[in-house]
Image (tube, rainbow, N blue to C red):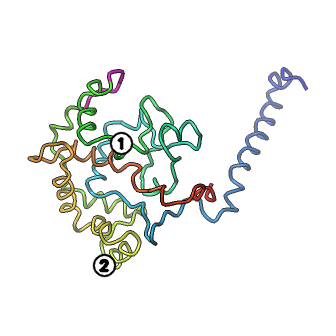
Amino acid sequence: MKHEQIETNAGLLIVLTLIVISIGGLAEIVPLYFLDGTVEEVKVAGRDTVRPYTPLELRGRDIYQREGCYVCHSQMIRPFRDEALRYGHYSLAAESKYDHPFQWGSKRTGPDLARVGGKYSNQWHVQHLYDPRSVVPESIMPGYPWLLKNNLAYKDINGRMRALKAVGVPYSETQVEYDANVQRFGREAADLLDIHSAEHNLLSQAQSSNYDGNGDTITEMDALVAYLQVLGTMVDFSKFDEGHFAKYR
């Protein structure tokens, strides 16, 4: 059958298109029924290393979304050699299981940020966000100087955490939930995930780390840098054998 015959016959084109879509859909859907799970188990010494965001990191993520950073930056490293050479290990589903919404993205006007945490200093991030071309001359990213001027709004942090808890993020409000987080993440992490201590934890992290370099106030820059610095740092791939996560793919 000539290609021209298919293109000029609308009915035949529709039928063949549906057949191709059906085959492709089955190829993606059917294997899922033979997998125990598609979210990797990431445990070290019996504890989950991927945890929900702390109150400060959570506010930073809110600002990341508000400023539209996701429009130009993805947060998903594909399982290809060139991506691994540039960014590191491909992204795990487990790394974004507490993200609502996830920030995978599909457009990279700027580089992928899935593993940007710890790659640069706090001071670098502050300067880059304030005046991108002062550290990356070829950058086309706009500056965000107001992040250093705007005091961080955090009085509603408890409500924000409760909203995420309602969709499955394991923040704790009861003693039972707190004890479960101790078993799952360890006591230090469980303390940071306690909704009742959210404001205290936010202030403590911002003041001790002083992300924006100004200890007098807590700014939106503190929160955004805190968020950027945690991206990709929860999984230490050196503690897992090569190919350990392949069984989940």
SS for callout 1: loop
Where 244 sits versus 25, above or below?
below
**Pointers 2 and 1 in contact (CB under 8 A)?**
no
Q: Earlier in the sequence, mark 2 or mark 1?
A: 1
Q: Residue at x 38, y 66 (%)?
A: 170
Classify 10 Å Cα crowding around label 1: few (below 14), some (14-19), many (20 and above): some
**Residue identifier under label 2:** 175
Q: Position of residue 185 (x, y in %)?
A: 38, 68
The residue stretch that appears in magenta = 137-144
Give the position of the C terminus as an image quadrant. bottom right
Give the left or right position of residue 86, taking residue 26 as reference. Answer: left
Q: Amino acid at mark 2?
A: Gln
Residue 156: image x %, image y %? 22, 56
Q: Quadrant of the N terminus?
A: top right
Three-letter code for the amino acid on which mark 1 is drawn:
Lys
Residue 53 within the magenta-colored segment of the rendering? no
Q: Which residue is mark 1?
A: 119
With 19 as the anchor, is 230 left or right in this view? left
Name the side, left or right, on which 245 lies relative to 187.
right
